Image (cartoon, rainbow, N blue to C red):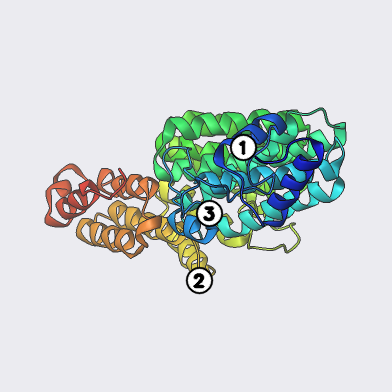
Amino acid sequence: MSPVGPKADEDQLRLWETGARTPRAGAVALLCRYYEATPYELGLGHADGVADDDAHPQRRMARTRSSFSGTAVEREPFFHDIDATRRSVDRALAAGTVAPGQMDLLDEQLLLVRYEYVFTPPARMVNKLLRILGEVRELLEDRQPTSVTVRLTEITAVASTLVADALMKLGAIDDARAWYATARHASDESGNAELRARVRAQAAMLGYYYGPVHSAVTLTREARIMSRGKPSPTAAFAVAAEARALALQGNRSEAAARVKDARGVFDHLAPRSDDDAFAFPLRRFLLYLSGTFTALGQVAEARKVQEEALSLYPARTGIDPALLRLEAAICLAHDRSATEACQLATAAYLQVPEEHRTAILGARARHVIDRLPGTSRRIAAARELGELLQLPGSHL
């Protein structure tokens, strides 16, 4: 008969803790319920009855699957346990609130994601952004000092904007619209005027690429009004985005006025890092001018800024160079060079790595066909481009 009593219980626990003996699954389950913890938090992750793979983290890692489906990420329980433990340790260190060091680490995570976002396929970035937002959500559920709450809402606004942008690229329009709304709400809650303007300028891209264009005009105008008064990357972005939206709407005079304003703001900006999804470097500014001139049919001006912008992009980048080439194809369509326009659009689309070849590129490539005169849409090059965009995997 096994010994019983407090001394025996202590001896039994000591044997479990040192690994000399392994508790049975039933005992582990009771302890987990009593302490409201996972086996890994209790140090009992290798209990009897646990499958061989479950007892070896390396094997479980090899079986781990992470997939993007809308906004859901599948993970093995082992990784949930790791995350739960790490967060509980962080919360214990914070002693009921968020320590400054913990906020700094969150900021560092977001800065790294903003850097990776420039060149990483959007589906992969959503997983990383959702992870950050999950941590922020847990922290916001507790009462925090005002300064901490402001920082958390700012992180929420930035991360939500990037989630929305990634979903927009993937063609998940309704989801993107919902996430942009969340980003706007968070930016408004933060009270940060520049962030409020930036989120609205970013959100306007949805209306620009997918419609309705009047929503893009409204959002960019709001962003311009919010950011006026001092030159900043956000102010330049807002005015350039408004010019592009107005041009697509057919408002030539206002679009031209905004181009002039945008140049004036951008010329007063101090040099900054280009390697950030929230930066607005010269190449991005030229991309917006390209969209404006292309929509206005000002082919010579469009080609000039397209060539300059393409010379500024690094080897590792996202879809902006392809968007510039597609706008060059639209310019060829304006010039009634239908075959050359469709051939350039086809080449631009196929040159993009498959993970980056998302719905936004397909939508822009289809604009090339839409700009062709009616009879030109039946030429062989136009049919081939249309068939390419309808193939499985075209993300349309």
**Residue 267 visible, this angle:** yes
SS class of the residue under badge 3? loop
Along the line of sight, the residue nearer the viewer: 114 or 192: 114
- Is residue 235 rendered to the left or right of residue 122? right
Q: Nearer the viewer, mark 3 or mark 2?
A: 3
- Residue at image x 46%, y 41%? 167
Q: Which mark is residue 96?
A: none
- Residue at image x 60%, y 30%? 182
Q: Position of residue 52 (x, y in %)?
A: 46, 54
Callout 2 amino acid: Ser
SS class of the residue under badge 1? helix
**First reached walking from the N terminus: tag 1 or tag 2:** 1
Separation of residues labelled 3 and 2 (CA atoms)? 53 Å
- Residue at image x 56%, y 55%? 117
SS class of the residue under badge 2? loop
Q: Which residue sits furthest front?
A: 1
Along the line of sight, the residue nearer the viewer: 77 or 320: 77
Q: Nearer the viewer, mark 3 or mark 1?
A: 1
Where's the N terminus, which quadrant?
top right
- Residue at image x 22%, y 55%? 338
Residue located beneath label 2 in the image: 311
User: Counting other residues with Cα less than 10 Å from the Cα at mark 2, is it few (<14), some (14-19), or many (20 or more)?
Assistant: few
Q: Is residue 130 above or below residue 342?
A: above
Residue located beneath label 3 in the image: 55
Residue located beneath label 1 in the image: 27
Callout 1 amino acid: Ala
Q: Nearer the viewer, mark 1 or mark 2?
A: 1
In the figure, residue 396 lies in which quadrant?
top left
Callout 3 amino acid: Ala
Q: Is residue 327 above or below residue 206?
A: below
